[in-house]
Image (cartoon, grey):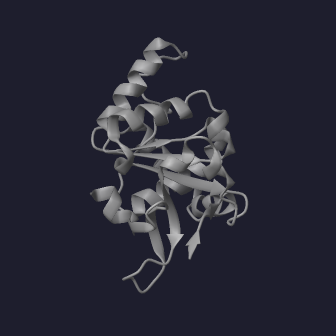
Amino acid sequence: MIIYTTKEEFRQFSNELPLNERTELRKRAQARSPEGATFLSHSSKDEDLVVGAIRILENHGAVVYIDKKDPELPPYTSEQTALTLKRRIEQTRKFVLLATENSKESKWVPWELGIADGKKGLNRIALFPAVDDRNDNSWTTWEYMGLYHRIVWGDLVGYEKRLWMVLDEKRNTAIPLSKWLNG
């Protein structure tokens, strides 16, 4: 059984930490080098979900990079912004898109996904869907979103307990999230 993560669950994963730890977790992801890290792409409208996603990814071995406070990004969006983001995506090992309805409407998120697709290939990209209803996977019908693996919670053959995994829905195969992040 595959379970998509709800937005409320992402918020809960965040709120389980004291405020100072949430702030520190975000600051570390914003301040670290992208070299060898996992790029977490997200819409600025989904800021309340980001710490929960970082927490899950880092609990499975990722070193998460988010571009929010990157010192090399110019203060105003420009061509330099695009060049820097492109370089950052190239520097990271994996690319994870926190996928919500806001992702599709963002000016930057689809572009970042396209850059990652061209530089990393399908096996180093995963969508981390944040849904309102755990049974709603309608976002997979958005043009190109169905191309990518998904981070989900569920049962995986060979494992006694449910776990976070990266699902290739087309092939009906999955691997543990920790194995995917470190592979």
Please determine whether, in this image, residue 161 is positioned above or below residue 13.
Answer: below
Residue shown at the point (55%, 56%) measured from the top left: 52
77 over 9 or under it: above or below: above
Q: Position of residue 132 (x, y in %)?
A: 72, 58
Residue 20 appears anywhere in the view: no
Residue 115 left/right relative to 111? left
Q: Nearer the viewer, residue 13 or 131?
A: 131
* Front-most of residues 157 and 46: 157
Q: Position of residue 130 (x, y in %)?
A: 62, 55
* Left or right side of 31 for 152: right
Q: Residue at x 41, y 67 (%)?
A: 174
Point out the image quarter for the N terminus. bottom right
State the image quarter where residue 168 is shown.
Answer: bottom left
Q: Does any portion of residue 40 appear in the rendered image?
A: yes
92, above or below 84, in the image: below
In this view, the residue farthest toward the top is 79
The number of numbered discs placed on residues in the rendered structure image is: 0
Q: Residue furthest right?
A: 133
Percent across and percent down for residue 88 are 36, 31
